């Protein structure tokens, strides 16, 4: 039996017939087995290497087969921009199985938050700071919201583990485990790093689950590098708009 064969039949159908994927990437196959077996893990792959699907396909499969109730998964990101970028993708994947996603951060209004608290979504996308605000707010029924929590996915986990925010996040995870009274599964997503075992130990915290680093064999690719002199902001915007048309792009600059 392959890793794909272990996914819920409904999800298998949509991967092939709705997403039109001919196959899974190595990191996805390896992670499916690890997550379905219930282990905590740190998943290593390059940017755009398929880590998001690697984590969420098996979680959605378990959500469907085991009939998880909301909120069953929390997705944590270090920055709001990443949450905004991931929301459409995760919404699409969740909707394949009739599940819902909600994004909670400082830019989300009070009305959507109230609707979420009345009718929680299956997957909550948030930042550690927003999660902290939820835990201490008297207006958020945190204990009820997280009573069904089964897993936490931490994107860019290396950015937390090697930073002061890591201690804060580690404490948050322990507090959330008290709220749901469950040893929930912990999944960290990371670009390739030199100390994945240390990151895994940090991620593990007080969890008693088995744990492992998911690291597929590296695929050597020739880098694609283009150098262009843009000259002005207007020309820079024009050049950027012509790159990878029809796709989302992240632009990193030296200053605001």
Image (cartoon, rainbow, N blue to C red):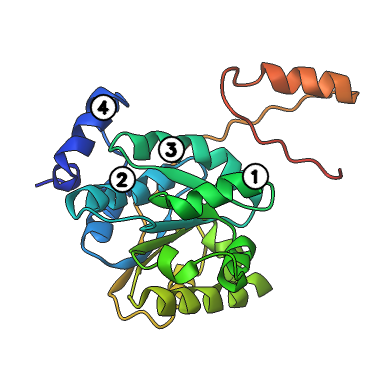
Query: Nearer the N terminus, badge 3 or badge 1?
Result: 1
Query: Nearer the N terminus, badge 4 or badge 3?
Result: 4
Q: Which residue is mark 1?
A: 81
* Position of residue 131 measured from the top left corner of the image (x, y, whole percent): 57, 64
Query: Nearer the N terminus, badge 3 or badge 2?
Result: 2
For label 2, the SS is helix
Q: Which residue is mark 2?
A: 57
User: Where does the C terminus fall, quadrant-wise?
Assistant: top right
In the rendered view, would you say 9 is above or below 226?
below
For label 4, the SS is loop
Label of residue 22 in the image? 4
Q: Which tag is nearer the camera, tag 4 or tag 3?
A: 3
Q: Are marks 1 and 4 in contact (CB under 8 Å)?
A: no
Q: Residue at x 56, y 35 (%)?
A: 223
- Please tell me which residue lies in front, 7 or 212: 7
Query: Nearer the N terminus, badge 2 or badge 1?
Result: 2
Q: Which tag is nearer the camera, tag 3 or tag 2?
A: 3
Q: CA distance from mark 4 to mark 3?
A: 21 Å
Left or right: 39 as drawn, with respect to 213: left
């Amino acid at each position: 039996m392959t890793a794909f064969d272990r996914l819920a039949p409904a999800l298998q159908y949509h991967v092939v017939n709705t997403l039109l994927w001919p196959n899974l990437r190595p990191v996805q196959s390896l992670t499916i087995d690890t997550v379905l077996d219930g282990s905590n893990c740190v998943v290593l792959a390059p940017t755009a290497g398929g880590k998001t699907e690697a984590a969420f396909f098996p979680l959605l499969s378990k959500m469907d087969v085991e009939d998880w109730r909301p909120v069953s998964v929390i997705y944590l990101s270090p920055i709001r921009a990443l949450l905004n970028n991931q929301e459409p993708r995760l919404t699409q994947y969740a909707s394949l199985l009739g599940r819902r996603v909600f994004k909670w951060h400082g830019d989300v209004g009070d009305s959507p938050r109230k609707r979420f608290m009345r009718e929680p979504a299956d997957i909550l996308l948030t930042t550690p700071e927003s999660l902290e605000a939820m835990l201490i707010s008297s207006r958020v029924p945190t204990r009820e919201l997280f009573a069904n929590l089964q897993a936490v996915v931490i994107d860019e986990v290396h950015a937390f583990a090697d930073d002061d925010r890591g201690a804060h996040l580690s404490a948050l995870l322990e507090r959330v485990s008290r709220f749901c009274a469950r040893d929930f599964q912990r999944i960290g997503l990371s670009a390739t790093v030199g100390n994945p075992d240390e990151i895994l130990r940090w991620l593990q915290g007080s969890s008693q689950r088995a744990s492992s680093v998911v690291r597929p064999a590296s695929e050597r690719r020739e880098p694609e590098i283009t150098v262009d002199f843009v000259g002005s902001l207007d020309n820079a915007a024009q050049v950027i708009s012509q790159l990878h048309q029809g796709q989302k792009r992240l632009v990193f600059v030296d200053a605001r």
